Image (cartoon, rainbow, N blue to C red):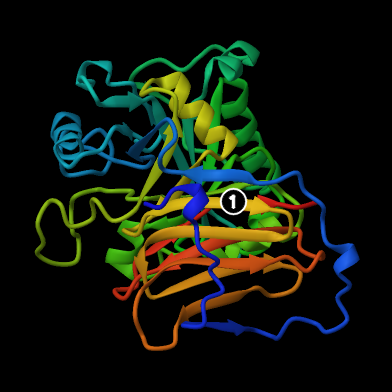
Amino acid sequence: MRHHADRQDAKDSSLVKTTMPNPPADTDSSTRPKTKGPQVFIDKRTKSWYKGNLHSHSTLSDGKLSPQQVATLYRDHGYSFLAFTEHQRFTFHSDLQAPGFIILPGIERNKSFGDPKRYFHINGILGPESMQKAATRPPYEHMQRLPMPDLEDYPVTGQAIVDEFLQSGCMVMFNHPQWSYNSFQDLLSINGYFAVEIFNYTSVMETGNGLSTIHWDAVLRSGRKVWGVASDDNHNNNRYGEASAEWDSFGGWVMVNADELSHEAITSSLLSGNFYSTTGPEIHYLSLDGNRVYVECSPVERIYFCTYFRHGYSRCDAAGKTIESADYELRGTEKYVRVECVDKRGNIAWSNPIFLD
């Protein structure tokens, strides 16, 4: 990767910029936010980067493989950490940890509710020490079963489940809203989750509805500062046909920038948004310098700058070649900017939002 001093201006003549719609002509540059730049959000040369899956199942709930088999599978594929999130059961398989591989204690709670019928699925992952010290409830124990949530009076009852997680020292992730048939209001009426699961690989493989960025943007437009997570939600069991045990593994993951591979460092970085999500492409560098957002990545077909308000734009090569960098000029009206890097096979890397208000 090029050094900072050698970074080229992404406004190369070979790049095509597409906008939907075109930037407004009446935007005054004096309204653009003033920043003390550059602010660097991603730099793959700093600290260390760790690959992990935050949503996983085993035979302790509805998965096909034992916890040992799942842990071995992910460790052998180069993952640094894994969260077991069994339905209604909190686990911490400390015995499955190894040099270069840690387990994050966790649980998934879920139930259908409402008319029209939909689902409420959230992960609780044991947070960093600061969350554990602030807990007002006893911590969950390994193999502790929790009752199926009562969601008759949603969102009040849904919020109560989130609050219980937080009071027990757990960080909360709102899972696969597209698969769950969730409306935007289902997410907006609940507070306290640090992330939305924007890509769920099992949902992609089984039913084709695992992408939930539209829900994420709805939450971001409301002014919430929430991160986006890609994960597997692997069950390693194809209910609808023959497939290998790995068929719903290794499809979506997070890359976390942390000082070290430890529970404290990884969960602290997750809470602060110091990570990106991907199904393949890598984001090497992301910065904000004055009015310019700049990104470098592995070779991709198109780079999108997703913003509100108004629409952002995308960049691609006029000759159809791959690109590895692009920039976006702020207009001064944006609440946030996030980046999507899409390769020729449709694999995507998502940055977390850069908040501008």
In the displayed structure, does residue 168 sit left or right of residue 329? Answer: left
Question: Which percent across, then down, holds residue 312?
Answer: 65, 73
Give the total number of marks visible in the rendering. 1
* Nearer to the camera, 286 or 86: 286
**Of all residues shown, which one is farthest toward the front?**
5
Q: Which residue is drawn at 25% across and 26% down?
A: 101
* Nearer to the camera, 170 or 1: 1
The residue under label 1 is: 287
Residue 202 in sight in this render: yes
Q: In this view, does 165 lie above or below 17?
A: above
Q: Is residue 140 above or below residue 296?
A: above
Q: Which amino acid does label 1 sit on?
A: Ser
In the displayed structure, does residue 162 sit left or right of residue 156? Answer: left
**Residues packed near mark 1 inside 10 Å, few (<14), some (14 to 19) or many (20 plus):** some
Question: Which percent across, then down, holds residue 346?
Answer: 34, 73
**Of all residues shown, which one is farthest toward the bottom?**
319
In the displayed structure, does residue 241 sit left or right of residue 307? Answer: left
* Nearer to the camera, 60 or 151: 60
Question: Which percent across, then down, holds residue 160?
Answer: 65, 34
Q: Is residue 174 above or below residue 94?
A: below
Q: Residue at x 59, y 19 (%)?
A: 131
Question: Which percent across, then down, holds residue 215?
Answer: 59, 62
In the displayed structure, does residue 309 sit left or right of residue 219? Answer: right
Q: In which quarter of the image is residue 258?
A: top left
Q: Residue at x 33, y 48 (%)?
A: 233
Q: Which residue is drawn at 56% across and 28% down?
A: 165
Q: Is residue 154 above or below residue 15?
A: above
Q: What element carries label 1?
A: strand
Residue 116 in sight in this render: no
